[in-house]
Image (tube, rainbow, N blue to C red):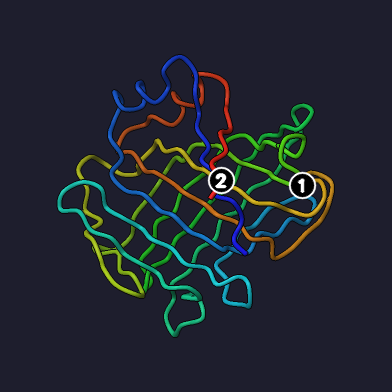
Amino acid sequence: MRMSKVSSAIVAAGLFMTAGAVAQPIASATYFDLSGNWDGAMFHAYAASAPGLMSSGSVARLVAPIGTADFEPGFVAAANPADFHLMLNYIPSGPGFGLGFGTFMITDADGDSISGNVNGLWIDDSANTPGQVFFNGALSNVVFTGGTFNGTLAGAFSTLFGGTPPYDGAITQLYLSPPGNFFTSVFSDVNTGVTMQILPAPGAAALMGLGGLLVARRRR
């Protein structure tokens, strides 16, 4: 059974209003049923094709000409290079909190990719929701390769955006429900979801610097 959906937001003194004033998102990516793995030092979220973990996804261009590239459940097992991989470390910074730094790469049906750096904050919310862990962060140095990003199920869009790459500024949301305490217990193949928004301007650092992180839960 898929976990409860979680919406996470960075908020402080009208954060989203400020973000909107900086730039509007040019692209977004959402992936469900990824395989989350923690070895005590590094967290990895991989696209998977296995019973109970049939990863699917959608990557969209949000500015004209808009378009969406869809990836069917278990897409990573198909005879093409489409994939998703996110990796993050964990640096303790207080009770139930930790810093995280890493990278991500999203690969389309013919090998083109979207990649970049990730930094933000891990939040152990097990005191309120047993076993639930969240990551809120920012993307930087985001680069699109190739001229068109193609889905494996349907759809495609142009990766030629205005402005000068690499693109900085995005909010990432990651949610998972690992067994035990995320920060102390090794686990593998835990259902994980990720959402991202990519901005055309260096807004991520400004957003992260505005202050506190609030996790708001929305149950399915």
Tag 2: amino acid: Arg
Residue at image x 45%, y 38%? 171
SS label for mark 1: loop
- In this view of the protein, which residue sits in the foreground, 17 or 94? 17
Residue closest to the far bottom = 79
Label for residue 7? none
Q: Percent from the top left, x then y, of residue 123?
A: 67, 36
Q: Residue at x 42, y 38 (%)?
A: 170
12 in relation to 174, above or below:
above
Distance (Cα) linking label 2 and label 1: 21 Å
Which kind of residue does numbered mark 1 sit on? Answer: Phe
Question: Where in the figure is residue 52, as x and y percent of width and height?
Answer: 63, 72
Residue placed at 56% from the left, 47% from the top?
174
Q: Nearer the viewer, residue 128 or 117?
A: 128
Q: Residue furthest front?
A: 220
Residue that badge 1 annotates: 182
Q: Quadrant of the N terminus?
A: bottom right
Q: Which residue is mark 2?
A: 219
